[in-house]
Amino acid sequence: MDKITVMIAPESDRVRILARAGTADVLKAVLGPARAAHPRAAATLLEGLSLWHQQALSVVLLADDGSDGSALCLCDGLGFGQRSVHYAVGLAVREERGRRRRGTLRGLGDFRDLRQLTLWEADQ
């Protein structure tokens, strides 16, 4: 099975999540705002996804200035991504270029910007 990468984009009114195995989408979600969620909600979601697929996940957390990423509690006190047996979190910034890819799930909106994330911090 291909390595699973989970991209998380926290925004003021929602959190978008895209999980990919290779070039295929395996999960797309639009959740409520991070500040309204339980502090362990993001970690528990990632642990469950890891257990479901029986492999550790590479997680890319969008760290734009306006993001609500700290509310997800996926970074330590120094701003580095959390690591566990289930996942390793890295921080990312957006790239400007984009293109349409095959193997995508449809119906939850446009996730092209999450596919364009570039790893910024922490080797996966």
Image (cartoon, grey):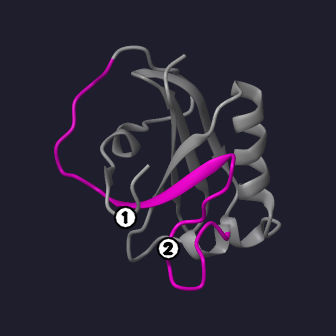
13 vs 80: above or below = above
Q: Is residue 106 left or right of residue 42?
A: left
Residue kind at label 2, given as amino acid type: Phe
Label 1 environment density (alpha carbons within 10 Å; few <14, some 14–19, many ≥20): some
Taking the spot 49% from the left edge, 35% from the top edge, the residue there is 109
Residue 71, x across and y down, in percent: 65, 74
Q: Nearer the viewer, residue 106 or 69?
A: 69
Q: Nearer the viewer, residue 88 or 103?
A: 88
Instruction: Inspect the magenta stretch and tell me whether residue 86 lies in it.
Output: yes
Under circle 1, the secondary element is: loop
What is the distance, in whole Å, between disc 2 and disc 1 at their CAs?
8 Å
Q: Which residue is mark 2?
A: 80
Taking the spot 58% from the left edge, 41% from the top edge, the residue there is 57
Residue kind at label 1, given as amino acid type: Glu
Residue 121, numbered circle: 1
Residue 89, x across and y down, in percent: 53, 57
Under circle 2, the secondary element is: loop
Q: Quadrant of residue 93?
A: bottom left
Given contact means CB atoms under 8 Å apart, are the residues at marks 2 and 1 in contact? Answer: yes
Residue 35, x across and y down, in percent: 70, 73
Residue 83, x across and y down, in percent: 61, 60
Mark found first going from the N terminus, 2 or 1: 2
Taking the spot 60% from the left edge, 55% from the top edge, the residue there is 15
Instruction: Inspect the magenta stretch and tell me whether residue 96 lies in it.
Output: yes
What are the residue bounds of the magenta stretch?
73-101
109 vs 74: above or below = above
38 vs 105: above or below = below
Q: Quadrant of the N terminus?
A: top right
**Outermost residue to the front:** 85
